[in-house]
Image (cartoon, rainbow, N blue to C red):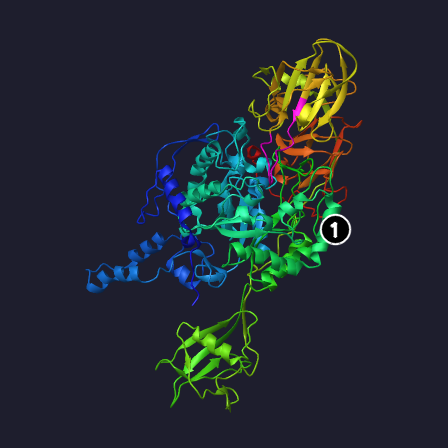
Amino acid sequence: MARGILATRRHPEDVWAWTWQVRGWLGLQKDGSQDPQRVPHLAFSRDQDAGTYAKGEQSRARPEAPRTSISQCLRNPPRDRRTAVSDYRTSVSAMAPKKPPCLPSLLLPLLTLLLPRADTRSFVVDRDNDRFLLDGVPFRYVSGSLHYFRVPRVLWADRLFKMRMSGLNAVQFYVPWNYHEPEPGVYNFHGSRDLIAFLNEAAIANLLVILRPGPYICAEWDMGGLPAWLLRKPKIHLRTSDPDFLAAVDSWFKVLLPKIHPWLYHNGGNIISIQVENEYGSYRACDFNYMRHLAGLFRAILGDEILLFTTDGPEGLKCGSLEGLYTTVDFGPGLLSKSEEWSWGGGPSAMMFIFHLCLLSAADNMTKIFTLLRKYEPHGPLVNSEYYTGWLDYWGQNHSTRSVHSVTKGLENMLKLGASVNMYMFHGGTNFGYWNGADEKGRFLPITTSYDYDAPISEAGDPTPKLFALRDVISKVPYHLTKRQRLLLILGKGVPKLFVKGSHKSVVVVGATELSKHPMEAFLTLPNGSTWGDTHKLYTKLLDLQHPLKLLPGTQVKNPELGSWNRGCSFGFLMAPERIWAQFQEIPLGPLPPPSPKMMFGPLTLHLDGDLLAFLNYLCPQGPIYSILPMTFEAVKQDHGFVLYRTYLSNTVSEPTRFWVPNNGVHDRAYVMVDGVFHGVLERNMKHKLFLTGQVGAKLDVLLESMGRLSFGSNTSDFKGLTEPPVLGQTILTRWLMFPLKVDKLVKWWFPLQLLKRSHPQTPSGPTFYSTMFAILGSSGDTFLYLPGWTKGQVWINGFNLGRYWTKRGPQQTLYVPRPLLYPRGALNKITLLELENAPPQPQVQFLDRPILNSTLHRTYVYSLSAEVQSDPEPMQLSGH
């Protein structure tokens, strides 16, 4: 009989030691009889105005986790998982007549304790049979990644429903620390940051959850999800057992983990497993004390039942895996892991060559990768935690794609091996605002605003041909395939006979046994590829049954339907092919929802509002920070966006003189102005010098833009701004004023008041604001903002930061505009641009009904809806990003 083993019961002593040590740090007790409804919890007081949480010091009882009724569990494994056991018991007791207690009624509670609980929920590793068990039943997950922080809250349900209708039974997602703790001790779980609301939406969609809370997540997200305020301690060592880093991690997880505790599967929720750290083997530190600390922290707060796991590429398993945590691997259709793909600096052409080369022996390489995984996880199911359906895009490179055939074939091969798979990404979404990350492959490579990823569900939430192909594979490859015969022991005169009970095609073995005087049924399961022709194998497998069957000499074989006997066999043999018993992934009935309506609009002519320097008092109302040498973003507590550096020339520079920053000290782009006149750009790793002139006392302004912090691999602390003092000729420039700019607040609150009407330059250049108002008179829908002729900048619609555009560099040419962001039926909408370099002669924009992600139109389906049949869209959470 298959033996389900909780993965946590195989933890080595070192992880247990860390578990109880961390429990002591958190003030928890080692009490096996602890009430499961009371867990350690930090009390919070909500600031209604700020919409944030402040830490408290008390504990309180957790709300009772949602559970499934006993009767439901006996009939079918629950889908909704929300009926409370207490409600069930209350209803039963209410209907029972009042009688004096008798002996049977007194014994009933004792019998209830002795019998197995029908409502016990579990997700465990069955190491004996290399599989997962969900509530004791063999289980394989086919999951997809979706990031709630890249999708507006009003669209969560739509994306999750489409994933479930695609045949997925789980969703995997990260929790970005910096998205929820913008300042130390200040927490935000509202709007598009409402993690619990997203878990609830996943439960409504009938999706289990694979949670990846970090603390580091990569995800091509700014600083890999780590808060930028960690760098306010310049000597901190990230992702190590540095006390400063661990103190911040512990403080964060004491807030986050108690929130998700009621949502663990065994508590009645939908979280079946949780990842510790993320691809740690690709990080240079290889600090096992750090990993042990995290494992102990998770166990101390979440308990011992939840399955904890790690994920690494094949080359990272050595430093990324830890005994006591279940080890999984990641690789894509080309069978390169994330770090291997990032290590190639030859660009998309080189990558495609390697990709096709790998496909030539994909099945063999897949076997090699899983064989390597077995060195670190000898028993249990095979798991690919990141199977890449596409790839990310960098500014200045081509849009990444992966063919439908290669993705589906790789998935099919893994499913045939019985592996559990998570597809990264199944829906990519958008890097709204300033949240994109960056990589370093010989040079600094910021990631585009679009995170379409060539995923099965497009950035706009539409199903693609890749989705339908993957859906077909999921529905056709069984997740539990066995060769099985149902055996019936029949007692007769003389020696008992063992027949096989099956369809008319099952002509099967009859054997004599010494076992029991009573009839019984047994199931005989053989692994994939086994045959029944070998009587020795048959005998061996019969002995492996829960009730061993001892075969006697003189065993005969009978075809029950023909009534014939075959004599002269020592044990018997199969006379016809065995019956295949297979369980397939459930594909929900019904069609997928159609693509959302798309809208074309424009062109619109934008009006010049003024250059950025004209609004400096509103962008930095608190005034500048003075320092002899320039300070970084982190030092002036500016996490994202822009900081203006200002100094004055100490002598006249009459001839063009080189202006530069030593040691590649521009992080990441610098827009240089002298007395308000734009002179050009310096860029990290790309452009290192300009030539300037100016009179003594001339005002030198350098606007620094952060393009996103490094998010993968050996990402050292990626400080932003001027990391070295600039040099003009032979003179080191000193005495700087730093203006941390609050551009989003200006756009959202002050621009609508139209506080200033300034004279505009005839030929504007450099950082300049443009805007216009427009109304949608007809039907509205999702759309894509196209900015032909513009250079680079940031866009806001109705105060919401859509993200960066970089039309001149590409590949992305349009920005996705979700329909809920726009006001319909004649209401005025406002679009605002901050163009950082040069605007076109005709400052116009258009809204298209399809995206341009690689200077090539990508097809989407367009549905026209009349205004009469459209409902009012739910207001978009503008505070969510």
- Identity of the residue drawn at 45% across and 88% down: 554
352 up-or-down from 133: above or below: above
Is 713 contained in the magenta span? yes
652 lies left or right of 418: right
Where residue 73 sits in the image (x, y, percent)?
41, 60
332 up-or-down from 784: above or below: below
Is 760 contained in the magenta span? no
What quarter of the picture does the N terminus occupy? bottom left
Badge 1 density bin: few <14, some 14–19, many ≥20, Cα 10 Å:
few
129 lies left or right of 697: left
Where residue 832 sits in the image (x, y, percent)?
67, 28
412 up-or-down from 20: above or below: below
299 up-or-down from 787: above or below: below
The magenta segment:
703-718
Secondary structure mainly formed by the magenta segment = loop
Residue 775 seen anywhere in this rendered image of the structure: yes
Judging depth in this view, the residue of 122 and 609 nearest the camera is 122
- Identity of the residue drawn at 39% across and 36% down: 42
- Residue type indicated by callout 1: Phe
Residue 167 seen anywhere in this rendered image of the structure: no
Where residue 859 sits in the image (x, y, percent)?
73, 48
Quarter assignment of residue 772: top right
Where residue 707 sits in the image (x, y, percent)?
65, 31
Please give the residue where the numbered disc 1 appears in the rendered image.
353
What quarter of the picture does the C terminus occupy? top right
Q: Secondary structure at mark 1?
A: helix
Judging depth in this view, the residue of 445 and 622 nearest the camera is 445
Quarter assignment of residue 736: top right
Q: Report the label total.
A: 1
- Identity of the residue drawn at 50% across and 79% down: 536
